[in-house]
Image (cartoon, helix red, strand yellow):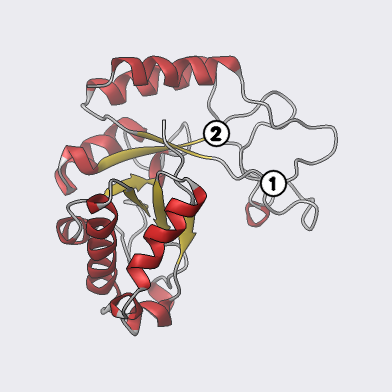
Amino acid sequence: MTIVPTGSITTPWLLKRTWEKPGILESAITLLQNEGWDGLQVDDESFPGSSSWDPRLPPLFGAFVGNLSATLVARNFRCVVDVCSTWHDYIIGPEVLPSVAKRAPAATFMDMSTYFAKGFIAGGDLQQIKNLKTMMPLYQIAIGVGLTEMPGHENASCGGFPQCTNFSNPACGCLDYGWNESSFQTFIAAAAAAGVTEIDVWRQDMTPPPSTTSDIPPWWIDTLAHFLQNAP
């Protein structure tokens, strides 16, 4: 298991090719060494969707993560990129994901489309794994799963509390990913059978609302431990 914190960059930062300035990528190495982290994870969600689309973004983002991942891997650090292969007209939607993956062969791409137990497409999460295998090499694929917590607070992302207390509002970041012991074990086993070797868990550790808990069910840990023990 590795600890890889997630961050994002802005559209102007990317369009100005800021990563090419001297010392920028090297500063990432210094950060990882100082903090004792295993790598960095880059989120593409700070970029505009179809309402303000700029065709320069996908190739520039590919160039950025390509250079960042090469720099990190050379120093034995990891580079993981958050993507969602079911979001169309997005910086790393299905239309451009294969080309971005080719520009960053040293990076791993965590697909957020598998966060939820029911999936987002016909055929559910298992079909999405099949689709991913047509977009990039298997070694670059990481399956994202949204963390399930103990009864009373069955979500992993309450980053909006206490500012936001309407927990049914997705804008609050409070999401019930819908996993239970049976469905999670079945999905992880099927992902392993499909050749997936990495499961990325999304957890946003913020203050849990009153009368709730952020503890993790034992079956969640046991299932992932079994996956790690049997991964190639």
Label 1: which secondary element: loop
- Mark 2 or mark 1: name the one nearer the start of the chain: 2
Q: Position of residue 110 (x, y in %)?
A: 35, 45
Q: 35 and 228: which one is in front?
A: 35
Identify which amino acid the numbered label 1 is placed on.
Met
Amino acid on which disc 2 is placed: Leu
For the point 45% across and 33% down, which residue is it? 118
The residue drawn where x is 43% and y is 73% is 48
Residue 147's mark?
Answer: 2
Query: CA separation, marks 2 and 1?
Result: 13 Å
Would you say the residues marked 2 and 1 are in contact, meaning their CB atoms lie under 8 Å apart?
A: no
User: Residue 30 or 193: which is nearer the viewer?
Assistant: 30
Tally of numbered tags:
2
Secondary element type, mark 2? loop
Report whether 176 appears left or right of 58.
right
Q: Residue at x 28, y 68 (%)?
A: 64
- Asked whether the viewer can see residue 43, the reply is no
